[in-house]
Every structure is written in C-alpha cells, then in structure tokens.
Image (tube, rainbow, N blue to C red):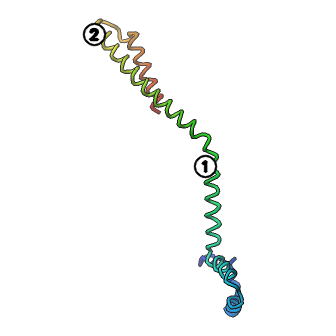
Amino acid sequence: MSDLSIPIETPAVSMTQDDMKTKLASSNPAKLYQMFLEVTGLKQSWESIVTTVTEIKSTSKAFKPYKAELQQRKADMDRARTLCNSFERVCCEGACKAQAVDQDAAVDHPVQSLCNQAAKLKAVISR
C-alpha cells in the first residue's frame, strides 16, 4: 500500500463498497465532510500547516527581543567602518606628507605605523 501512496489509516481503505454505500447513505453532512477530509488526507495536511504556523509564530516571538540589539550592533558596525575609513585616509595622507618632507625617512615612520594599524583595523571590521 505504501508503494502506491495509499494512506491505510483512512476509513475508506478498510471498508467494502457496500459498507461505504451504507455509511454514506446513513451519515449526516458534517460526518460526511469529516470522512472526506480523512480520506483525501486534507485533515492531516491542515493539521501540519497549523503546527508549522504555530512553530513559526513561536520562533518569531523568541527572536523578537534580539531584533533591537541586532539593529544597534549593525549601526555600531557602520559607525566603526566610517571612522576606520576616515582614520585610514587621514593616516595615509599624513604618511605621504611626512615622506615628502623627509625623502630619506625610514619606512617605519610613526605616521606610517598608524596607517598600518588602521589597515589592520579595517580588515577586522570588514569581516
């Protein structure tokens, strides 16, 4: 039965044609509709949908308190990126000016060191 995708738990599977005719003739519309839902599998599908919607609502409620914190952290990261970009730009401009003033300046000029630190910070923030 499972190879043919016939649900064996439905009442229609276990009833003969004569039993089904008798059942259909003697049942009221509400019971017939319930039997239709069971035979077609709509009842199980509906219950599955209701369960899924309930789980989604529950999960949404569980994450709701973290939404504001996540938005705040995103704003903090955006501000950090902006500051880092500004700091890197200022440091690099300062390093270029320092090297222009002293052509014989070593590569480890203090301004160049700050510029390298800014680049490292930017790499960390960019992740």
Q: 107 or 21, which is in the foreground?
A: 21
Disc 1: CA contacts within 10 A as few (<14), some (14-19) or many (>=20): few
- Taking the view exactly as shown, the residue that stands out farthest to the bottom is 18
Locate the N terminus by quadrant.
Answer: bottom right
Please determine whether, in this image, residue 8 is positioned above or below residue 62: below
Q: Is residue 124 above or below residue 3?
A: above
Quarter where residue 16 is shown: bottom right
| Residue topped by disc 2 | 100
Query: Which residue lies at the image location 39% right of the left edge and 21% below the top edge?
Result: 88
Q: Nearer the viewer, mark 2 or mark 1?
A: 1
Mark 2 vs mark 1, CA separation in Å:
58 Å
Q: Is residue 57 left or right of residue 14?
A: left
Amino acid, disc 2:
Ala
Q: Is residue 65 above or below residue 119?
A: below
Write down the residue under mark 1. Answer: 60
Identity, as a three-letter code, of the amino acid under mark 1: Ser
Nearest the viewer among 35 and 100 is 35
Mark 2 residue crowding within 10 angstroms, few (<14) / some (14–19) / many (20+)? few
Task: Tell me the element at label 2.
Answer: helix
Tell me the residue at 61%/44% (across/down): 63
Residue 87 figure quarter: top left
Estimate the x, y position of residue 115 in percent, counting from the top left: 40, 17
- Check disc 1 and report its element: helix, strand or loop: helix
The quadrant where residue 51 appears: bottom right
Q: Position of residue 78 (x, y in %)?
A: 46, 31
Viewer-proximal residue, 94 or 21?
A: 21
**Percent x, y for residue 22?**
71, 92
Q: Farthest residue to the front: give it.
A: 29
